[in-house]
């Protein structure tokens, strides 16, 4: 298996994509025009309390963090791999008068102390934009470390069984998905999406894959549902993001 350093799919390229001004503009617009999705609000209302210390991990320009602030959560922090995204989020916080600490962090090696947060949200399929299954497991372990006992972690992923992706991955010999022939891939499920802002990486997992990773990293699965099962989202949200699977997990004792 190739390492991330040897592959074109590496953290440096991910950071470059999210530091691109076109990508930043896209995420800034999402703060103003989209905000929290109905599905996100439903899960937040169900699992989080207003006094919780919450981390918006992979926060981008702060769409979820500012949505939480608007809902009445006043102990919110945000972190992102992209320095430019963090700078934009800080500027927006200043304009809104929102007291939210935004900082630059790598989800696979967070600088926060142990058991700092009551809850962590890793929205918009951000966990799956980390290349390499071991790196994604490392991020799951880091979230486990910084969350308090019985704390909740909410995140989303795409789903390889979804109608949109069933046909995409039907032929494992297709060059686009053949890890032996395609040097841009680390493992089955890796995808490179062409967007208006450039090419971005996304891993499209199976449900079983995520369940196994959660068990391997000490999480208890509380709930998982497709977004379309949770809420009827607006057309702007559906244009912003295809259907995804939401996961709610709890930190269990070692």
Image (cartoon, helix red, strand yellow):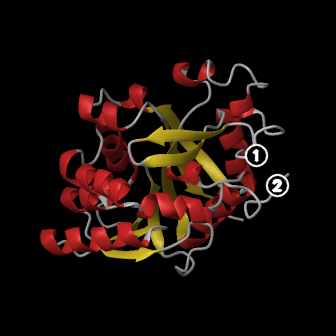
Position of residue 152 in the picture relative to residue 213 (left or right):
left
Task: Kindly identify the residue that appears in the image at 55 percent across and 70 percent down.
Answer: 106
Q: Decide if residue 234 is in sight here.
A: no
Q: Is residue 49 above or below residue 128?
A: below
* Above or below, comparing residue 156 to residue 239 in the picture: below
Q: Residues within 10 Å of mark 2 (few under 14, many from 20)?
A: few
Q: Position of residue 85 (x, y in %)?
A: 36, 66
User: Counting other residues with Cα less than 10 Å from the Cα at mark 1, is it few (<14), some (14-19), or many (20 or more)?
Assistant: some
Q: Residue at x 74, y 25 (%)?
A: 174
In x, y percent, where is residue 173? 79, 25
Q: Which x, y percent locates residue 148?
A: 53, 69
Residue linked to disc 2? 2
**Which label lies toward us, 2 or 1?**
1
Q: Does residue 182 lie above or below 63 as drawn? A: above
Residue position for label 1: 183
Displayed quadrant of residue 165: top right
Q: Could you tell me residue 250's position as x and y percent?
A: 56, 54
Check disc 1 and report its element: helix, strand or loop: loop
User: Which residue is rendered at x = 50% and y = 63% of the image?
Assistant: 16
Which numbered marker is on residue 3?
none
Check if mark 2's residue and mark 1's residue have beta carbons within 8 Å: yes
Element carrying mark 2: loop
């Amino acid at each position: 298996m190739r390492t991330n350093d040897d592959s074109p799919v590496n953290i440096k390229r991910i950071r470059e994509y999210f530091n691109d001004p076109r990508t930043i503009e896209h995420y800034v617009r999402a703060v103003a025009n989209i905000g929290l999705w109905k599905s996100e609000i439903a899960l937040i209302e169900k699992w989080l309390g207003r006094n919780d210390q919450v981390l918006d991990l992979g926060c981008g320009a702060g769409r979820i963090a500012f949505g939480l602030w608007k809902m009445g959560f006043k102990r919110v922090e945000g972190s992102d791999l992209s320095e430019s995204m963090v700078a934009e989020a800080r500027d927006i916080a200043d304009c809104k008068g929102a007291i939210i600490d935004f900082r630059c962090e790598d989800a696979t090696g967070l600088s926060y102390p142990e058991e700092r947060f009551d809850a962590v949200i890793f929205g918009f399929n951000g966990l799956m934009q980390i290349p390499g299954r071991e790196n994604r497991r490392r991020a799951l372990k880091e979230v486990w470390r910084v969350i308090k006992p019985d704390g909740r972690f909410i995140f989303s992923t795409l789903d390889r069984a979804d109608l949109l992706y069933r046909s995409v991955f039907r032929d494992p010999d297709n060059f686009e998905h053949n890890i032996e022939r395609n040097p841009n891939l680390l493992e089955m499920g890796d995808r490179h999406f062409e967007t208006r802002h450039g090419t971005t990486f996304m891993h499209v997992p199976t449900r079983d894959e995520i369940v196994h990773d959660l068990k391997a990293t000490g999480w208890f699965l509380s709930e998982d549902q497709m977004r379309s099962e949770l809420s009827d989202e607006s057309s702007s949200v559906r244009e912003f993001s295809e259907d995804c699977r939401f996961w709610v997990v709890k930190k269990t004792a070692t």
